[in-house]
């Protein structure tokens, strides 16, 4: 029971690891001066409320007060896929023997014909062993 649960949890963890390693996403951060205002992963970051003041200040100082920073987390673009020919000879032999043994394991036997399946023995009228006084000792 515990082994089966552990196997399922490990399989799920490996599937999630593969999914997360190939997924890409962007983290958007909005700074007002040196203060972090908002961080968003799957949506746009919320801007600060001083946009009208910021536009006027930027016209005067020529330096923007607020800035947006995008952090792109890129996933893996390609996965290595090996074919049967990429394996060593020993690995090929092991894989072939394993698949053959696994297929033979679940092979069903041919149905055997039993001619005496529905045979009912005749009714005994007398016990022959007692009649002939023959006993196994």
Image: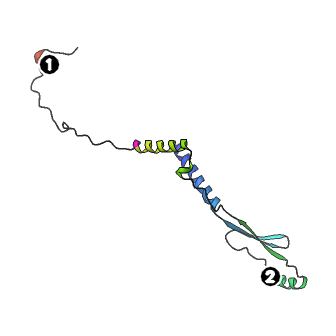
- Residue to which mark 1 is pinned: 129
Residue 2 can be seen in this image: no
Q: Nearer the viewer, residue 54 or 63?
A: 63
User: In the orientation shown, which residue stands out farthest toward the left?
Assistant: 125
- Which residue is pictured at 21% across the width and 16% down the height? 136
Q: Which secondary structure type mostly characterizes the magenta part of the structure?
A: loop
Q: Is residue 137 above or below residue 77?
A: above
Q: Secondary structure at mark 1?
A: helix
Work out whether residue 35 or residue 66 is closer to the camera in this orientation and state it: 66
Q: Which residues are magenta?
A: 104-122
Q: Quadrant of residue 34?
A: bottom right
Q: Residue furthest right?
A: 61
Task: Report if residue 28 is visible in the image.
Answer: yes
Q: Residue at x 11, y 30 (%)?
A: 123
Mark 2 crowd level (few <14, some 14–19, many ≥20, 10 Å Cα): few
Residue 72 percent across, percent down from the top left:
72, 67
- The residue sitting at 50% across, 44% down in the picture is 95
Query: How many angstroms separate mark 2 from mark 1 (CA)?
Result: 114 Å
The verdict on residue 40 being magenta is no
Q: Quadrant of the C terminus?
A: top left
| Image quadrant in which you'd find residue 121 | top left
Q: Tell me what residue is drawn at x 9 percent, y 26 percent.
A: 125
Q: Residue 13: horizontal and vertical position, in percent?
A: 60, 53
Residue 37 drawn above or below residue 129: below
Q: Position of residue 68 (x, y in %)?
A: 78, 73
**As rendered, which of 88 and 20 lies closer to the eye?**
88
Q: Which residue is mark 2?
A: 51
Q: Nearer the viewer, residue 24 or 2?
A: 24
Determine the secondary structure under disc 2: helix
Is residue 114 part of the magenta span, yes or no?
yes
């Amino acid at each position: 029971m515990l082994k089966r649960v552990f196997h399922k949890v490990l399989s799920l963890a490996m599937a999630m690891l593969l999914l997360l390693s190939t997924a890409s996403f962007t983290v958007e951060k909005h700074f007002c001066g040196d203060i972090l205002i908002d961080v968003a992963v799957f949506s746009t970051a919320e801007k600060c409320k001083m946009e009208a003041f910021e536009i006027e200040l930027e016209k005067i100082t020529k330096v923007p007060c607020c800035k947006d920073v995008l952090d792109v987390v890129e996933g893996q673009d390609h996965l290595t896929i090996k074919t049967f020919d990429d394996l060593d000879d020993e690995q090929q032999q092991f894989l072939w023997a394993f698949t053959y043994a696994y297929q033979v394991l679940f092979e069903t036997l041919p149905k055997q014909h039993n001619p005496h399946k529905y045979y009912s023995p005749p009714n005994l009228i007398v016990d022959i062993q007692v009649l002939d006084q023959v006993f196994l000792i």
